[in-house]
Amino acid sequence: MLYALDLTRRQSNRVLEQALRTQAVVEIEPRNWPDAPPISGHILSNDGRQMVIALDDDGRALPIASFAGMFCDVKTMLSEQIYIFGASIVEASAQTVPHTLTLATPETVQVSNRRRFIRRTLARASQVEIVVDEGLDSFVGEFGNISGNGLSARVPREADDALLIGEPVRVRFAMPCMKERFDLRGILTNKTASPDKATLTIGVQFEPPATSDPRAAAAIERLRAFLCDPAFSRHETETGE
């Protein structure tokens, strides 16, 4: 399943700042060239009004100068999460090395969420702690389901203002039949109020651990192995993909 959610202006700015800081690959698809492959590059600068994209080698054979004035769709991936936005191409330069496209900085970025792992519902009620604002706020909720890529949980309604889609969180929990307690970083991908407005159902996607944090990487691998173990079905119920 694939769907997209609009981020707030603040969240959108943070996504673009992270893409610039990490030199993430961006893919640009000019709408007047629907059958052409995406043009890849990375963000050189962004002053809040315009962003400059340095193009990779695959852009050199294209008529770059003709792209000025076109509208384009842009996609980038951060922490295994896909972000998309539309923008107009303000300027296109084939005179520089590398070639560059200057885009109008978008006001809104969308986050796209695709389930990549089987999700399982825990047969026994288990708690999960959601920590936000670097530990300034935390909320205890109940597991909804979990996969090797993330989890869902029900938390109190009063957590709504503190839990912002696209913002980083930490999730702390223990799995039934496992002695280990997990403490993982993630990104809040969605939240929905219950019909009675008493709770929120939230979705968190685990953030890939940095290469400098082998313990966190090993913890996620152990969790994924446990969820894929055929013995898991003796205690829990598989819910889908």
Image (spheres, helix red, strand yellow):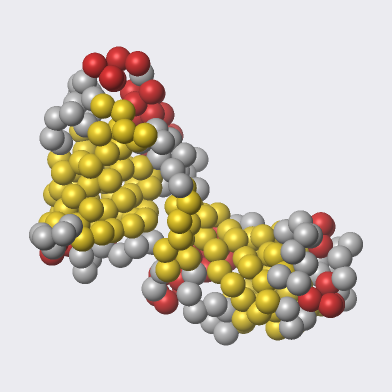
Residue drawn at (28%, 46%), measured in percent from left and top?
152
Q: Is residue 181 above or below residue 195?
A: above
Question: In which quadrant of the rendered view does residue 49 lie?
Answer: bottom right
Above-or-below relation of 83 to 173: below
Q: In this view, does 228 lie to the left or right of 52?
A: left
| In this rendering, position of residue 25 left or right of residue 106 | right
Percent from the top left, x then y, of residue 50? 62, 81
- Locate residue 119, reporting x and y percent: 35, 35
Q: Is residue 132 above or below residue 109?
A: above
Kindly identify the residue that appears in the image at 81 percent across and 57 percent down: 58
Q: Is residue 79 shown left or right of residue 92?
A: left
Residue for point 74% across, 83% down: 69
The picture places residue 192, in percent across and down from the top left corner, at 26, 59
Q: Measuring 28% from the left and 58% from the top, which residue is drawn there?
A: 191
Question: In the image shown, does 97 or 163 lie closer to the viewer?
Answer: 163
Which image quarter is the C terminus in? Answer: top left
